[in-house]
Image: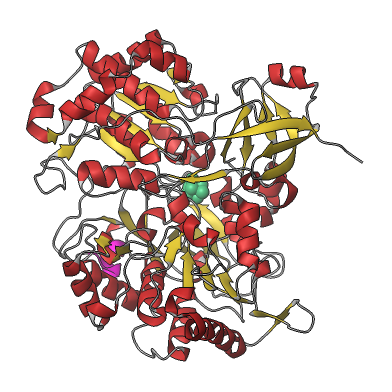
Amino acid sequence: MTTTDTHCPYCALQCGMGLRRPPPGAGPGVPPVEVVERPGFPVNRGALCGKGRTAAAVLDPAVRLTAPLVRDPATGTLVRASWDEALSRVAAGLEETATRYGPEATGVFGGGGLTNEKAYLLGKFARVVLRTPHIDYNGRFCMSSAAAAHRAAFGIDRGLPFPVEDIATAGCVILVGANPAETMPPLLRYFTELRRNGGHLIVVDPRRTRTAERADTHLRPVPGTDLALALGLLHLAVADGHLDEEFIADRTTGFEQARAAAMAHWPERVEQLTGVPVPLMREAVRRFADAPTAMVLTARGAEQHSKGTDTVGAWINLCLATGKAGRPGSGYGCLTGQGNGQGGREHGQKADQLPGYRSLTDPAARAHVAKVWGVDPGTLPGPGVSAYELLDRLGTPGGVKALLVAGSNPMVSAPRAAHVTERLAALDFLAVSDVVLSETAALADVVLPVAQWAEETGTTTNLEGRVILRRAAVTPPDGVRTDLDVLHGLAARLGVPRGFPTDPQEVFEELRRASAGGPADYAGISYPRIRAEDGVFWPCPHPTHPGTPRLFLDRFATPDGRARFAAVSHRPAAEEPDAHYPLHLTTGRVTAQYQSGAQTRRVPELNAAAPGPFVELHPRLATRLGVTEGQLLAVTSRRGRALAPARITDAIRPDTVFMPFHWPGAGRANTLTNPALDPVSKMPEFKVCAVRLEKAATG
Ligand code: SF4
């Protein structure tokens, strides 16, 4: 048996695992590869969730694409084609559109699951080959509000500015809109250790989730009121004398404005808005401030709002005001969701950023990256529009008309998904590279089947900023190519024969140079070093630098070294319940499915555990509507209607219903969600909108 050390293909924890191959000639019935524990990797210490344990199932040729597909103009169906024909058709589709409407009519939509090398080369492809500003990715829907607030407060954005092991040493942790018991089960051990060490866990969530059940304190705000709650807590921190005046004076700026904004939010008014009683708020603040070390960790529940950036800013304010940042065991962090959500946003597939987290509008940054790419900085396009804006304008005058989608399934994962589906269908040309025939791929003119995690080598950067190496353990099936091969082939056909290597290590070496000196500096990280150290934390500016597991201990990454308070005020959700749509809808995840479910819905064990969507509602609401367990319900918002069976539970508020978003078709939760955007991060408001609930007519 040969075992290859690698990492899970799914979430941002990037758990270490081994892939074991049987000896040659092992005989029929022996799987080509199986997932085994790798206890030596520090993040998960051998533990894996069901998704990780079953990850090898998607390598099965029976469930994935093994040949390029092109749409037959005569029948309108997708038919098998050669790679040469498929790549030539993609190149022609992009080129014809650029010739007819200009390069800005071409676009790229990437994914937070792509390796650093792919994300880097995809950004270069858009800007150097297509010369379009229009590249963004599904990570915009994931952690962009946290990233924006993190950058505003601390100068740079890294999901967690400390390793996950620090969670266990904190005296108090406030988890806001985070449900790791469902999304990252191996992370739970750190919260268990925290409590065993005498620490206090506070969970802020409208639902009594499996994570909330493990908390010492559960605050259950009305959906869309996290910002008000954070302001109320800061108000109480001031009123009850919990400020760390020395820290505020020595290491921060802007406190007076933030304090004034918070003091306008009286706790009694905050209680009215959030439903969280003042004594509970007061106790939470006391626990947090009195703990010698403490953290606030947010996830999508706090971030996926039209005020997500301000909401995260308000929670960071609480950390700063109480001196719980920039010290070992303390700080603010974001539990990033997608496998390479962190690295995917560092290397240039975001509409406004160049590799190394450099700004696309900074002349020095443009000059540096242009030099690495061997192009004139003047030829680099400026910033494009954000993910939803890009999708919303597809096929319209002035919008993108030919789109390349890589590793993303916006037909299921984007808000107002029926509209997004219409826009995708309105394109002159759509190409999708993916592992499986996702719902978006099924709509394409050309589908490019690509290799996946266990079949190719490449780096990802997990939620801690730890750069790790996924290693190839098996050979991809015949008929499959890597994303790097695809970009190389397309670039060559579009007149750029050089600069798109197919060897991931060669791409990484270029990425190191492009990131050197930038906020996310990878210059000192190399494949041999990652192999030797099992991961290196950025920033790591030179080969003898130890890497940076803990940021901000001496100074924050702002020009003056001080963290910046955000002066923010409560505002309501973009859509509040009314007479026509009287309930809040909030959406989220279940353990056995991942994101749009394109991969996990193809794994029998996961499908058996979570076979389809459901609507979670409170028993009182069920009684009022005469709904019984399992009855088919119609959930209607201003965007459309979704059907799913009832799941009655008192874990949800009576004024709120919940749907997971992993499925397409009639039960697609994102048919309902509101694309109202955060003005800074351009994050859509996935986490709250107004809906009506009815029994669906059957038969
Ligand atoms: Fe994979 Fe995330 Fe599960 Fe770990 S927690 S096994 S990284 S899906």
Residue at 44% over, 54% down: 139
Up/down of 378 relative to 601, above or below: below
Q: Which residues are magenta?
A: 525-530
Residue 420 position within the rendered picture, expressed as x and y whole percent measured from the top left:
60, 57
Asked if residue 598 can be seen in this view, the reply is no
Residue 582 x, y percent position in the rendering:
64, 26
Say which quarter of the image contains residue 297.
top left
393, above or below 67, in the image:
above
Side (left or right) of 78 relative to 316 = right
> Which of 663 and 463 lies nearest the eye of the viewer?
663
Residue 407 drawn in magenta:
no
**Magenta run includes residue 527:** yes
| Residue nearest the viewer, comparing 154 with 378 | 378
What residue is shown at x 12% (from left), y 40% (from top)?
562
Q: As drawn, which residue projects farthest toward the right?
A: 699
**Residue depicted at x 74% and y 48%:** 666
From the viewer's perspective, tell me whether residue 72 is left or right of residue 447: right
- Whole-percent x and y of residue 385? 41, 61
x, y (%) of residue 106? 48, 75
On the question of residue 88 being in view, the answer is: yes
Magenta span: chief secondary structure: helix
**479 on left or right of 485:** right
| Above or below: residue 172 compared with residue 85 | above
User: Toward the viewer: 608 or 257?
Assistant: 257
